[in-house]
Image: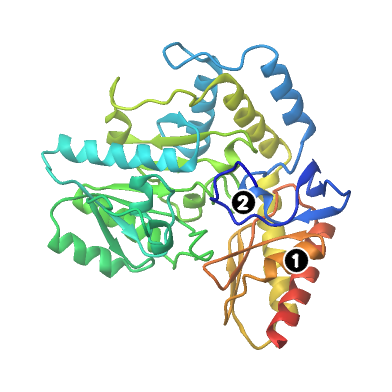
Amino acid sequence: MSNLMNTYSQLPVTFVKGDGVWLWDDKGTRYLDALAGVAVCGLGHCHPELVKAICEQAGTLIHTSNLYHIGKQEQLASKLAVLSGMDNAFFCNSGAEANEAAIKLARLYGHNKGIDLPTIIVMEKSFHGRTMATLTASGNRKVQAGFEPLLTGFARVPYNDLEAVAQVAVHNKNIVAILVEPYQGEGGVNVPQAHYLQGLRHLCDQHGWLLMLDEVQCGIGRSGKWFAFQHSGIVPDVMTLAKGLGSGVAIGACLAKGAAANVFKPGNHASTFGGNPLACTAALTTLAVIERDDLIRNAMELGDFMRSAFKAQLADVAGITQIRGQGLMIGIELSKPCGELVKEALKRGLLINVTSDKVVRLLPPLVMQRNEAEQVVNAVSALVKEFLKT
């Protein structure tokens, strides 16, 4: 009997060692990791520079408090501002906390404008976290069930539907912001239509709303740009990050620009652990390695190769609905639920994920090389073909 709360349906494997894109379990079996801790381990496992930096920082100073200045936090905020074009950052510990900060920022922004019931437009099939505010914002009934009453202050519309957003603007004068994932991850690796983000930016500018982008999964190079919004040529008012930012060390960030950057004042929001020296060291090292080793270009080129290779191998296979994605964020949608493929892949030494019931999701480390990508394509294609024949 485990003393852990029963919150996960864990797979029957225990990993004890990692190196690059490979993991080993407690029996010595090796696995090719095409999930990267769900888009977390962009540098792969145990990257030597990351390990060295964390060890040195742990031996110097792990934590003080945000009651005092933290030099590494200032450095990280400056680096993210340069890379993104945003003005400032609040640091926390997770994507849910980063999105919670964004939601609070939007509500305070609305109250400052005299709006008593500030409301945020959110999307169907979205996922923003499991706190009460972020699960309410998520367009996923499974994460909400049993936790009612949900919070007020959210208006939901279909993803990729600008007209639906425009209609909300007509009928609801309490809107203060839009919260959207540029590329939906948990919702099935859904890709924005051409000009969708530009259209949202226009609507926000027209109505005085904040455009808030959840880049927790698609940010930090995964899309083939530092941030997914950079594919569209727009800049958000608020952007949230986590996952790949710390390469496995817990850190989240809520970045803001323009009027949004001046909403929070001392006492409005805080985090005990957020942005401590250890977490910021991990993030700074992660960004430095990605930049130096041109891993963003690798993500773009390898992602293009993998999607093309999948389309070639699965071209004549009945039951493939769509192959989509951006950079190293890849989804293969099947015509029927395919959750069992996760265990089948594990038996063959491969880590994958299935989301939205029917979508095989691949989120490989940004350090993956061509020969390893070929192994993933060949193995997943074989699994899908066998599955669809049954």
Q: Do tag 1 and tag 2 residues touch (Cβ < 8 Å)?
A: no
Residue 336, given in percent of the width and then of the height, sits at 57, 81
Could you classify mark 2 by the number of other residues whose Cα lies within 10 Å: few (under 14), some (14-19), or many (20 or more)?
some
Q: Image check: 20 left or right of 151?
A: right
Element at badge 1?
helix
Q: Image check: 209 left or right of 245?
A: left
Residue 194, given in percent of the width and then of the height, sits at 44, 67
Residue 296 bears which disc, if any?
none
Q: Identify the residue shown where x is 52% and y is 40%.
A: 242
Q: Identify the residue shown where x is 40% and y is 43%.
A: 99
Residue 67 vs 85, above or below: the answer is above
Residue 174 vs 260, above or below: the answer is below
Q: Which residue is mark 2?
A: 38
Residue 345 bears which disc, if any?
1
Please state which amino acid type lies under the numbered disc 2: Val
Please state which amino acid type lies under the numbered disc 1: Ala
Could you classify mark 1 by the number of other residues whose Cα lies within 10 Å: few (under 14), some (14-19), or many (20 or more)?
some
CA distance separating discs 1 and 2: 16 Å
Residue 366, given in percent of the width and then of the height, sits at 70, 48
Quadrant (top left/top right/bottom left/bottom right) for the C terminus: bottom right
Residue 122 vs 214, above or below: the answer is below
Residue 188, given in percent of the width and then of the height, sits at 52, 66
Dividing the picture into quadrants, the one containing residue 352 is bottom right
Label 1 or label 2, whichever lies nearer to me, is 1
Element at badge 2?
helix
Q: Identify the residue shown where x is 69% and y is 57%.
A: 11
Judge by depth and name the residue closer to the eye, 301 or 307. 307
